[in-house]
Amino acid sequence: MTVKTRFAPSPTGYLHVGGARTALYCWLYAKKTEGQFVLRIEDTDRERSTDESVQAILDGMEWLGLAHDEGPFYQTQRFDRYAEVRDELLAESKAYRCYCSKERLDELREQQMTNKQNIGYDGHCRNLSDAEQDLSKPHVIRFKNPLEGAVVFDDLIKGQISVNNSELDDLIIARTDGTPTYNFTVVVDDLDMGISHVIRGDDHVNNTPRQINMIDAVGGQQPLFAHVPMILGDDGKRLSKRHGAVSVMQYRDEGYLPQALLNYLVRLGWSHGDQEVFSHEEMIELFDLKDVNRAPSAFNTDKLNWLNQQYMKSLPTEEVAKHLQWHLNEQGLDVSKGVSVELLIPEMAERVKTLKELVPAIRYFYQDYEDFDAKAAKKHLRPVARQPLELAKEKFVGEDNWNADKLHALVNATAEELELGMGKVGMPLRVAITGAGMSPDLGVTLEWIGKDAVLRRIDKALKFIAEREANS
C-alpha cells in the first residue's frame, strides 16, 4: 500500500501552530514511508473562507518548508463531484430529503435538552414516501445513518474506539442551497484522492464514526485514522492567542527560524528518548505515529526560545543570514557595506534568542548609535576614562594594520602605559564604540566596526565625558 496523507485546513483564518503541527506530522509520515503528501483547501464555508486566509496557509506551509506532492486542491472546484455522489446516495435510498423547519428543529433540541437526551435529528423525514415530498419546498439532504450496530475503528494514536450507531443522528450532507457539508466532502475527497492515513486533531474524533458510515455506504475503503491530542497553554488551558496560538507567519515576524519552530512542534506530543534537537533528516527517520502521546501537550515559549537560539548557533550561517534578511529589511538596517553579517551571526547568537533581537544587537557595526546606554555610560564613561580613551585613540590613529590581534595589542599597550587594569581601559572603550557594555571580543569588535567609525565614536564619548564633568 502506498501511504498518502493529507493536510486539509479550512481557510477561515491563518495557519496556527496546532494546524502546523498536524501538517508536520502528515508530512513526516509521508516522507518516512516514501509516500505522498496532499494539500487540500476545504473552502466550502463560503461566508468565512477568504482569499487572504488561503494565501496565509500557503505562505505558512512554504515558510515551514512543508512542500506538498499533490495539490493544492480546492473543494469549491469539486461541487459537481459532490453532487454526483449525493445523487447516488439518494438513488440508493442511503440519503433522503428533509423538509423540517428551523422552528421544528429548535423545538426538538429544547425537548431533548429538557429530557436529558442525546442532541440530534430524530429522523422525522427519514421514511417519507414520494407522494409526501415536494421538491419545490426548501429542504436539505441527510445521510441515512445505520440504526443498529456500532462503529469500531483502531485509532493509531488513541487505540480502539467504539461508538454505537444509536448515538449518531442523520447528519446533513447538503444544505438548502445545495452546497455540501464538511463531513460529506471529506469522505468524497479522501476516497477520490486515495488517502491512506487521516492524521488530524482529536477535535475530529466525533466526526470519524459518521464518516466511516458514509465510506461504507459508498463502498469505499476506510483509511487508517490517527487523532492527535490538542495543544494546551503552559497554564493547562486550551491554547489561545496569549499562549502562542497565532499565525505561523507571526513566528517568522518575531524572529524564529522555521527549522526551530518545526523542531519545537514535532516535540509537542512526540518524543524519541531524551533527544531535544532534531534535523529534518532525523525527524523523518525517527518519527512514528505510535510514539505520539495520547495526552495533550503544553506550549512553552521558553523552550521555543532555547531551541531557536540553538539553531541560530548551529545552522550554516548563510542559512541564518537568508532568514535574517527579512528582519534587516523590516528594521531598516543596510548591511551591504562593512563586516559580513555571516561573521556576526555566530558571535552574536549567544547574546540573543531571535533574529528580531539580532538586528538591534548588530546595528552598531553598521550605524553610529544615537545615545549611550544610560547604565553603561554612567558606570564607565566617567572623567577617569578620558585619559585611556585619548591614548587609545592616539594609538589607533597611527595604525594602518587594522586587525583584531594588532588592535588588541594596542589596547594592552594603553593599559600598561597608564598602569591600569584592562577593565579600566577596555570597558570605557567598549562603551565608546558600541554605545553599550556588551559586545564580542574587543579586538574583533574594533576591527569589524572599522577605523573611521571607531575614531568618530571615541570623540563622541570624550565629548560626553566633558559635558558630564562640566555639569557635575
Image (cartoon, rainbow, N blue to C red):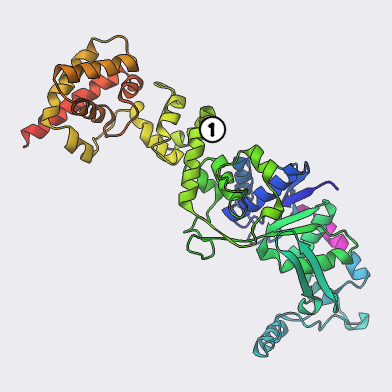
> Quick one: 310 or 58, which is closer to the camera?
310
- Quarter of the C terminus within the rendering: top left
Q: Position of residue 418 (x, y in %)?
A: 13, 19
> Quick one: 135 or 33, which is closer to the camera?
33
Q: Is residue 215 left or right of residue 115?
A: right
Tag 1's secondary structure? loop
Q: Is residue 228 above or below residue 308?
A: below
Q: Is residue 365 left or right of residue 275?
A: left
Tell me the quarter of the picture where residue 424 sits: top left
| Start-end of magenta stretch | 76-85
Q: Main secondary structure of the magenta part?
A: helix
Q: Is residue 355 above or below residue 397?
A: below
For the point 24% across and 31% down, which residue is it?
431
Residue 299 appears in the rendering? yes
Q: Is residue 428 left or right of residue 246?
A: left
Pointer 1 local density, CA inside 10 Å: few below 14, some 14–19, many at least 20: some
For the point 29% across and 18% down, which residue is it?
408
Say what amino acid the circle numbered 1 marks. Answer: Leu
Tell me the quarter of the picture where residue 349 sits: top left
Q: Which residue is mark 1?
A: 315
Tell me the quarter of the picture where residue 162 sits: bottom right
> Quick one: 210 or 122, which is closer to the camera?
210
